[in-house]
Image (tube, coloured by chain):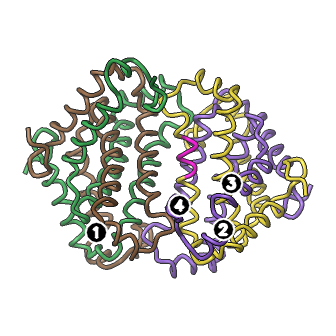
Chain colours: A brown, B green, C yellow, D purple
Amino acid sequence: MNFVDSKASIEDLKRIVKEFCDDRDWDQYHNAKDLAIGIITESSELLEHFRFKSEKEIEEMFKDARKKSEISEEMADVFYFLLRLAQKYDIDLSSELNKKIAHNEKKYPIEKSRGSNKKYTELL
Amino acid sequence: MNFVDSKASIEDLKRIVKEFCDDRDWDQYHNAKDLAIGIITESSELLEHFRFKSEKEIEEMFKDARKKSEISEEMADVFYFLLRLAQKYDIDLSSELNKKIAHNEKKYPIEKSRGSNKKYTELL
Amino acid sequence: MNFVDSKASIEDLKRIVKEFCDDRDWDQYHNAKDLAIGIITESSELLEHFRFKSEKEIEEMFKDARKKSEISEEMADVFYFLLRLAQKYDIDLSSELNKKIAHNEKKYPIEKSRGSNKKYTELL
Amino acid sequence: MNFVDSKASIEDLKRIVKEFCDDRDWDQYHNAKDLAIGIITESSELLEHFRFKSEKEIEEMFKDARKKSEISEEMADVFYFLLRLAQKYDIDLSSELNKKIAHNEKKYPIEKSRGSNKKYTELL
């Protein structure tokens, strides 16, 4: 199996996460609350890279291979816990994403939201 | 295109996210810091469902179709921002996840971590 | 000045935080967005201590002087950024807390919320 | 009792939080993990106000009385859970803050950190 975004499906990725956890017998610890804590704590490590940094400094980070790799690792940690939660509770992330996009197309109609950073509750 | 976990590739999912954002001309707002804020704030909405709830109450939530759907929506929101960040900065989530798993197989060797909730720094 | 909870006011604490930051000329970096990022990233380091730990294991942590001290340090980090944000934008935390408690007394009337973990939106 | 930052001690604030919770018999739900979840989820609601907003837009928010009040309320929510965690586990926030500042004075010596947004690990 070639694990690249052009080929891997979410099901492929769920499978390698499940195998990793099954090998360690971690079902007993991986309840939804702790997995959601996993997601948020790893999201925080991602965000921490950008704390007190200007937009220009952050753009430079992504041009630095080592720094970009560190940031990508934090994203993989978030993804790992998200996949694990989806796998354990039988949630289809692809169809949920697709539904969400369809839903947001209504909340953020193009003619009102184009070029705007307003929240849907603020759109006139 | 059938957006289900067994068929969609990560690239397919990145594409629908990109189209949604391009249609709204949101590149100007979607810098890495704000996208990382997007990830953590949506992670928090996911976690909030479980606040002060017991493990038993949480397991019941996943048996309730409406509640499970609400939780799944929060997961889609996290996923949306994660995909958008990866798409904008050209990060291959599948290969990052695969590398991370390989890395964690060393940090958490099966014989030491099996059945244990210890952090790798606590494993003897 | 004796910095203990029985004597120190929020104003005293804001003052030492302000002096620390002024000495380093950090006003230029301490905008509201980055200070709020400070609060959430430190909150996450606090929460991470409890990830995958049972209630019993966590209660043990607070009986271990070194572990309790580590946890208390994370709380100080959250408090530092909260005070700094309040000090910079002239927000009176004591009166805000007092108002919030008064507000929550209405949202959570004793007769309905006593012994219950329901959110106010779920209270009949 | 006058609940303003110039007069209230942290102990006074802990006391009103404790009374509010005791009246509702919430000790049973207020374990450290869920209180830390309380802190981070409220931190996230604070941060969400600033998502996708420019520094200029955020400065305007603080000049708008209603918006400033909304932001201050989120800060009160964070503070409430921080005080509750400290009160329940007998942690003196003032002395912890004071120790942290003393510690950070060493990690961030004025001559090296003045005018710099570098993390202590990046200071030469």
| Sequence order check, earlier mark of 3 and 4 | 4
Q: What residue type is labelled 2?
A: Ser
Please tell me which residue is depicted at 53% across the width and 60% down the height of the picture: C37
- For label 1, the crowd category at 10 Å Cα-Cα, with few meaning under 14, some 14 to 19 and many 20 or more, is few
B24 vs C69: above or below: below
Residue appearing at x 29%, y 77% in the figure = A114
Residue behind mark 4:
C37
Numbered circle sitting on residue A63: 1
Name the chief secondary structure element in magenta: helix
Q: Determine whether the residue tagged by mark 4 lies in a helix, strand or loop.
A: helix
Answer yes or no: are tags 1 and 3 on the same subunit: no
Query: What's the distance in space between the residues labelled 3 and 4, CA to CA?
Result: 13 Å
Relative to D119, say whether B98 is above or below: above
Which residues are drawn in magenta?
C42-47
Q: Name the residue under label 2.
A: D69
Q: From the viewer's perspective, tell me whether residue B63 is left or right of residue C84.
A: left
Task: Choose between D9 and D75: the one closer to the eye.
Answer: D9
Residue that mark 3 sits on: C79
Q: What residue type is labelled 3?
A: Phe
Query: CA–CA distance between discs 1 and 4?
Result: 23 Å
Circle 3 packing at 10 Å, graded few (<14), some (14-19), many (20+), is many
Q: Numbered disc 4: what chain? A: C
Label 4 CA crowd tier, 10 Å (few <14, some 14–19, many 20+):
many
